[in-house]
Image (spheres, rainbow, N blue to C red):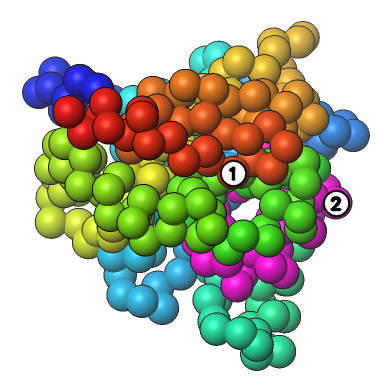
Amino acid sequence: MKRFRLSLVLAVVLAVAVAVSLGATRASAGKGDKVVVEPGQKVEIALTSTGQFGPGFKEGPFNAVMMAIAMHPTIRGFPIQVKTVDIRCSSDPVPPATDVLNRVAATAIVTHVQNTAVIGDFCSSASQVMLPIYEEAGVVAISGSATRDNLPTLAPTVFNRTVVSEGDGGEAWFAQVTGLPSVQDWNHYHGAFPVSGPTSDFDSLYFDAATLLLDRLQQVSKIKDGNLVIDRKELAKAVRRTTDFPGVTCTITLDPKTGNRINDPASLAGCAG
């Protein structure tokens, strides 16, 4: 895999000048399984995050997602908005208060009809509660850090991840990926976006999750009567069909049955070289 070059950094810095608003927007009415974005409105994406483990675990993934958006600031000319949603992580068994908080967060995401997708959830314990809610609403989710093996069963059509499951590589895979030259190079750029912003080891995986999502949104969205129309079912299918996607964390292929990232030692060996 070719390393990022200075030109990429310059492109990111220039793209930051493009207005990517984080404020609230007026929601137009969704129509069934479709999200309809009217002229002057934004393509909305939810990012679930937590500051429980330090600011890097909240701000790092957010800045990584914003870096991806700076490189791809619109979907067919419509600007993109990201809104963070706070969640809570915990060990099993999940405390009732945490369970309720995460259910409320997931419900808020899916009832806001303009949310096209979720980047997250950050932790598996939250996903245990939130994924069934996404599944029922048909809202696609792409996580860069939730690794529990059973998660695909909770959202069989909408759950995906750019990290492998615990049973398919676990910590050894994670150490290999985060040590790749492409990831090390990307970390230098990420550290300047913004300068001295807190980071986490998962950030490159969230950059890939956001980049993949933006690519698929561009692929499936259509302009109709001046509006941008995004079919959630088509988006879910397009994400699941991902093969050989050129990520910072090496080539990404998702299992079409589960949404799991496939552990590909041959590909990783090539990226390491």
Is residue 20 shown in magenta?
Answer: no
Please tell me in which quadrant of the rendered image residue 4 appears: top left
Q: Nearer the viewer, mark 1 or mark 2?
A: 1
Residue nearest the viewer, comparing 251 with 36? 251
Say which amino acid is labelled 2. Glu
Q: In the displayed orientation, state which residue is furthest to the right.
A: 32
* Residue placed most toward the observer, 71 or 80: 71
Tell me if 107 is positioned left or right of 95 in this view.
right
Q: Secondary structure at mark 1?
A: loop
Mark-to-mark CA distance, 1 and 2: 19 Å
Residue 107 showing in the rendered view: yes
Q: Quadrant of the N terminus?
A: top left
Residue extending farthest left: 6
The answer to whether residue 195 is above or below residue 97 is above
Question: From the viewer's perspective, is residue 27 above or below residue 223?
Answer: below
Which label belongs to residue 136?
Answer: 2
Where is residue 257, by image quadrant?
A: top right
**Number of the label disc, if any, that sits on residue 260:** 1
- Image location of residue 17, percent across then percent down: 27, 29
Q: Residue at x 76, y 55 (%)?
A: 153
Magenta residue span? 109-137
Q: Amino acid at mark 1?
A: Asn
In the picture shown, does residue 56 fall above or below 157?
below
Residue at (16% x, 48% y) in the render: 191
Percent x, y for residue 27? 71, 41
At mark 2, the secondary structure is: helix
Q: Is residue 64 left or right of residue 112?
A: left
Instruction: Give the crowd class for mark 2: few <14, some 14-19, many >=20 residues within 10 Å.
Output: few
